[in-house]
Amino acid sequence: MPEQAQKTSGSPTPEVRDFLRRRREQIAQRWADEPLFRSVFTVSRDEAVEAGKSVVDALAQVADAERVEDPDAAGFAAVREQLARMGAARSRAGLSTGQVSTELAALRPPVENLLLSDLQGASADHTRASVTVLNVLMGTLRVVVMQTALSEGQSLIDRQRLQLLEVATPVIKLWDGIVAVPLIGTLDSARSQVVMETLLETIVEQQARHAILDITGVPAVDSLVAQHLMKTVAAARLMGAECIVSGIRPAIAQTMVHLGLDLGNVVTRASLADALGYVLHQLGVGIVTPGPNGAVPR
Amino acid sequence: MNEAVPWPLPGPATGHVPVLRLGDVLLVTLQGDLYDSTAEQLQRDLAEAIARSGAAGVVIDVSGVDVVDSFLGRILAEIAGQARLLAARTVLVGMRPAVAITLVELGLTLPGLRTALSTEAAMELLTGRAWPARSGGRHRGSP
């Protein structure tokens, strides 16, 4: 092991880099005992040590590039996935983001102690500068892990939002010339836009003269939702189809009256069945129940 | 916009929109982009045609129109208004979904206009009798 006491005049960052490369094995061994590594790599300690080594290597590479404060440094690229996996494993175990951050912070003291023991005999200034560089580097590592965890969560949310848009807007053909849209969940601008587009497309495609918007699955109707409904109805009317709103529950009807919401001259019905009955009547179609002997009453 | 577009643009720049007469219904088919002047010309032509023929209905087919701006929207509403004064009903036919959404977003819901999905449906609406039914007719479910 080279004698570092002579290099008191060296700049602190290469000093830390050399230290990380020299003490790679010891640091990884100590990290393997920390809760973060121990709880992620439960099967074998060797695995934890290997993971620790690759993180130390990444840190050394970042220090080599003199970019200790940059979470986007190229050196982190190699371990980003591994760090994300570790962060995700801890989150799955029920730890909050703050607790994961604390566990990451616990990785710093063992390294710092090692560095201090290596720097015995060096000048106080040099020691302080080196420790500062190490602290900054460990701080950046924390930022990298947090960043990765957040972007993972964000991409999950984006994916689910898209899925929700796809799932929630089926247009159902009820009869020749009658289509229905069962709306489920809160209607925001993006979703009502999708609903409107799919409904209008279906109206053209099926030459449907009547469309039923069923809002049984909409938890609450405020002025914004009412406005979206009115817009959809108006657009359908412009294309030559009549739109009926059904599934207004008593509680919602009450809220709408309290809020002073007016659906204008939109035809409304309490249930989808009522709306279908109304439309069939408009079309001059009747449904008759056969008599006991299977005869259709005239 | 393409830089190679000749000016003035080819198309209905100077032309009138033809007004066809089917019994006591006037049929107008709008195609592509309409100039403001052409739309105004159509408005005048229709007023005269209704007065001359004593037509009971006007069918305006907009299925070939990609863009309806606020001006054309107003012209359509005015055509309906003047037709009503001349005792004719106006039906707008075949509006595209994108156009309908744009008009609603612009706040132009054209309340005075009747609408229909197809020319066939519009004729049925105006004459009060079913046009010869298509194969696999609509009332298949009726007893």
Image (spheres, coloured by chain):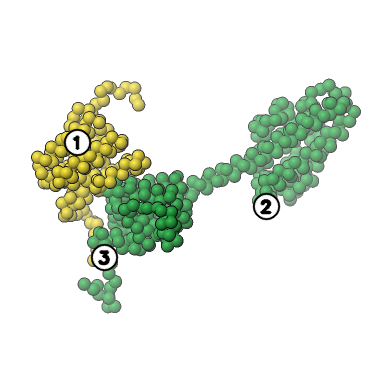
Chain colours: A green, B yellow
Q: Tag 3: Cα neighbours inside 10 Å, few (<14), some, or many (≥20)?
A: few
Q: Gap between marks 3 and 2, in whole Å?
A: 59 Å
Residue A53 image position (x, y, % from top left): 75, 38
Is A77 displayed left or right of B10 in the figure? right
Residue A274: image quadrant is: bottom left
Q: CA distance from mark 2 to mark 1?
A: 70 Å
**Which quadrant: the N terminus of chain A?**
top right
**Residue drawn where x is 20% and y is 45% of the image:** B90
| Residue at the image position 24 percent from the left and 57 percent from the top | B138
Residue placed most toward the observer, B56 or A55 = B56
Q: Which residue is mark 3?
A: A286
Left of B56 or right of it: where is A180? right
Decide: few, some or many residues near mark 1? Use Cα within 10 Å; few <14, some 14-19, many ≥20: many
Q: Position of residue A137 (x, y in %)?
A: 73, 33
Same chain for mark 3 and mark 2? The answer is yes
The chain letter for the residue carrying disc 1 is B
Query: Numbered disc 3: what chain?
Result: A
Q: Residues within 10 Å of mark 2 (few under 14, many from 20)?
A: few
Q: Is residue A237 visible?
A: yes
**Callout 3, which amino acid?**
Gly
**Disc 2 is attached to a residue of which chain?**
A
Query: Is there a contact, CB below 8 Å, between mark 2 and mark 1?
Result: no
Q: Quadrant of residue A248?
A: bottom left
Amino acid on which the number 1 mark rests in the picture:
Gln
Q: Where is mark 1, residue-wise?
A: B43
Q: Along the line of sight, which residue is nearer the eye, B141 or B122?
A: B122
**Circle on res. A94:** 2
Give left or right: position of A192 versus B70: right
Q: Is residue B84 above or below residue A72?
A: below
Q: Nearer the viewer, mark 2 or mark 1?
A: 1
Residue at 65% in and 34% down: A77
